[in-house]
Image (spheres, rainbow, N blue to C red):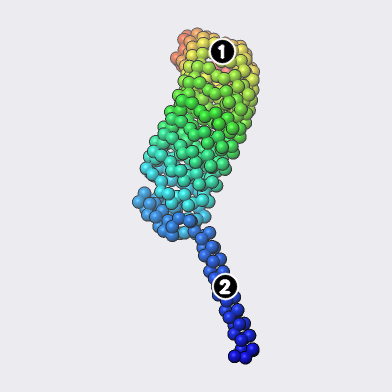
Amino acid sequence: MNKNAITLRQSSALTLTKTNNLISLTKKLLSAKNALARPINNDNWCEELWSWADANSIDESIIPRIVDSLMKLTALDLRNNNLTELPETLGNLTQLTDLCLSHNNLTELPDWLGNLTQLTNLSLGANNITELPETLGNLTQLTDLDLWGSNLTELPETLGNLTQLTYLHLDGNNLTELPETLGNLTQLIYLDLGGNNLTELPDWLGNLTQLTNLYLGAINITELPETLGNLTQLTDLHLNGNNIAELPDWLGHLTQLTNLRLDGNNIAELPDWLGNLTQLTYIYLSHNNITELPETLGNLTQLTDLDLAGNNLTELPDWLGNLTPLTYLDLRHNSLSSLPKWWCDNPNLNIQYP
């Protein structure tokens, strides 16, 4: 074979090798692209999810039956579907930012829920969940976590990782204590702990200085930690349905309060400093043991609602008539023999009496 033929054959072989390599590389790239476009589980996960949705009568407007639409899903509302369990295939919907699972019959939550790391809103209220998976602490983008009415008896310490939370609903559970790590949630503006059985409150609640709404109703407490005096941004404070007999002086420093609920306690005497809370529009004092009202309450010139029902009042002071913004005054179930004449001077006032 001559030299030119050998050179030509080598060149052809080299070209063929390069072509094969290029084809192989192209196949790998296409394969990689396709792999990124689908979940890493199995190729049938969409069909499995759709079968589950069909079995639970979940409409395609909620769970799309088109792959592209399913993969782009950012909000999923599965409330009121009588769900008892969640399929693992839901864990492939990694673009979700909003997930609502409230008002179902769930008794436990899967660990894979912690893989949905884009979630900002998660609602799990009104289920039968007694504990939460540690993996919830992975959802560090959450700003709103709703766990109300879910029979929880304890909380994982990993919830302290959710430092972007601004709303946390824990009301209506069976909690007896709170993990100290919740003191890390310093972005909270709304915290509802009502309807639990805490009996006492931790000092670290005073770290949550961004709070504007704090609900502590019906948790069986008898006193309040002094650190709550740090919560000077509070506008709404609910302490109703407890066993509080005396109000601490530091409450008078919460001068941004507009709504204060003290009803259903054992308060016999109201302190003069209540008159410092001049932004109050609603104050609920019903079902206590109050026998008289301090004159300083006359400073509350923004009041529109005053509830004094179920106390031991025998007369009303004349200065109450100066609270002209009042539109609602509840005086039922006291020991009043009559109403003062000033009540007629405010035609907008709705008085509940006797």
- For residue 182, what is the image quadrant? top right
Rendering coords of residue 349 (x, y %): 54, 22
Residue at the far left in the pictured view = 55
* Label 2 crowd bin: few (<14), some (14–19), many (20+), radius 10 Å: few
- For residue 317, what is the image quadrant? top right
In the picture of the structure, the residue carrying the numbered disc 1 is: 270
Q: CA distance from mark 2 to mark 1?
A: 87 Å
Q: Is residue 329 visible?
A: no
Label 2 residue SS: helix
Rendering coords of residue 179 (x, y %): 52, 29
Q: Is residue 264 visible?
A: yes
Quick check: 56 left or right of 116? left
Quick check: 205 left or right of 111? right
Q: Residue at x 53, y 22 (%)?
A: 201
Q: Nearer the viewer, mark 2 or mark 1?
A: 2
Q: Nearer the viewer, residue 132 or 235?
A: 132
At label 2, the amino acid type is: Asn
- Classify the position of the N terminus by image quarter: bottom right
Quick check: 211 left or right of 130? right
Q: Which mark is residue 114?
A: none
- Classify the position of the C terminus by image quarter: top left
Of labels 2 and 1, earlier in sequence is: 2
Q: Nearer the viewer, residue 84 or 178?
A: 178
Task: Please determine whether, in this image, residue 77 is positioned above or below residue 237.
Answer: below
Q: Nearer the viewer, residue 338 or 21?
A: 21
* Label 1 crowd bin: few (<14), some (14–19), many (20+), radius 10 Å: some
Q: Residue at x 64, y 18 (%)?
A: 276
Count of picture labels: 2
